[in-house]
Amino acid sequence: MYLVGGPVRDLFLGRPLRDVDVVMESDALDFARRLSETLGVPARVHERFGTATLAMPGGGRLDLARSRRESYERPGALPRVEPAPIEEDLGRRDFTINAMALELAPGTRLLDPFGGKADLEKRVVRMLHSGSPRDDPTRAFRAARYANRLGFRIETGTRKWIADASGRGVFGAVSGDRLRRELRLLFSEENRAGAVRLLRRLGLDREIDPALPREASILQCLRRAERIAGRHPGKTSWLLYLLTWTAGLESADLERLSRRLSLAGQEARTLRAWPDVLRALRSEGRSATPSGILARGLCGDEMAAAAATLTSAAAARLDRALSVLETRLAIAGRDLLAAGVPAGPSIGQALEATLSARQDGKISRRQELAYALAAARREAS
């Protein structure tokens, strides 16, 4: 039984461990089921790959797998797997720093056949062999993600292998789902501007879409977007950074990008409507109020991305709108009825006016009922 991959890397780097990967040279699925029952935690089993994931108390995750070898029918395809010794399992991995194993039982030896520990000391991200980005082109995006997260550089040979894979057109075979997943992961970590800079240096932005802008100002906007998101925790998602990156693109470009990333539902609608949203917010100028912005039904990602890309005056109004995005009234229609307001449309209209006043900072929570009663009387008169 071996601790493998990222946890071994992070142990050497002194980074905290949250998720743990364990590989066994025996049936991992049977062990996972028995461990799940013993610990009383759920297990998600993936029969095709011989892996299982246990959701641990406190939000951590334990991944269990049988050591295996992989083969690829074509670039970008999911691999076919079969059992193999731990040494072969390490040889199928993405980077040397993720290709180490620490024996947990019966001994405590370190397996490091590709020099991962030395690369940690040199602070480099290096693929195991030249065919790695052809076997799985998403490894190129992971190289950028790890280098950005750890503050490492991507080794020269690895950069050349990625460029060669790009020249062979292998990135076109990556499904939109897998590409979107890599971008989501990239934009879920800190320093998004650094991540985009690395994608550019590797030419991977062109593999996502050739129209993605490369101006230095985009990196500044991404840094602003990250600061805005930090002021409004829980109100934005990874989509904020995609919107910020694509500010200035036209509808046709965003329609193509949406298809490339296989976006669906609200995410697809948000990206496609992005140019119209920006134009509308620009045209409002100084007349825009937080309640007026919120009345448009914009999500937190749209408001934060617009704040990161528009003028400072517009950004301040959008930032204010974000701060009151989840404002709810302490009163309801029954409170107006109890105060003598007759049933009818004036109650709903009064509550809407009161919510707008709260969003615009005109009244406090304690003033809601008095304001609503006055608004209801105006509506009824």
Image (tube, rainbow, N blue to C red):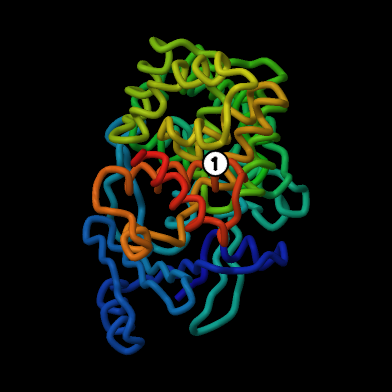
Q: Is residue 30 above or below residue 111?
A: below
Total count of labels = 1
79 sits to left or right of 106: left
In the foreground, 91 or 353? 353
| Quadrant occupied by the N terminus | bottom left
| Quadrant occupied by the C terminus | top left
Q: Residue furthest front?
A: 381
Q: Residue at x 34, y 41 (%)?
A: 380
Q: Residue furthest bottom?
A: 38
In the foreground, 271 or 79? 271
Where on the picture, by quarter, is residue 121? bottom right
31 sits to left or right of 224: left
Q: Residue at x 51, y 56 (%)?
A: 370
Q: Is residue 370 visible?
A: yes
Q: Residue at x 61, y 60 (%)?
A: 112
Q: Is residue 133 above or below residue 5?
A: above
23 sits to left or right of 348: right
Q: Secondary structure at mark 1?
A: helix
Q: Residue furthest left?
A: 47
* Residue 116 on image: x %, y %: 65, 54
Binning the other alpha carbons within 10 Å of mark 1 as few (below 14), some (14 to 19) or many (20 upward) gives many
In the foreground, 359 or 278? 359
* Residue 126 on image: x %, y %: 63, 41
In the foreground, 363 or 73? 363
* Residue 244 on image: x %, y %: 57, 27
* Residue 216 on image: x %, y %: 72, 19
Q: Which residue is mark 1?
A: 186
Q: Residue at x 27, y 46 (%)?
A: 80
Where on the picture, by quarter, is residue 247? top right
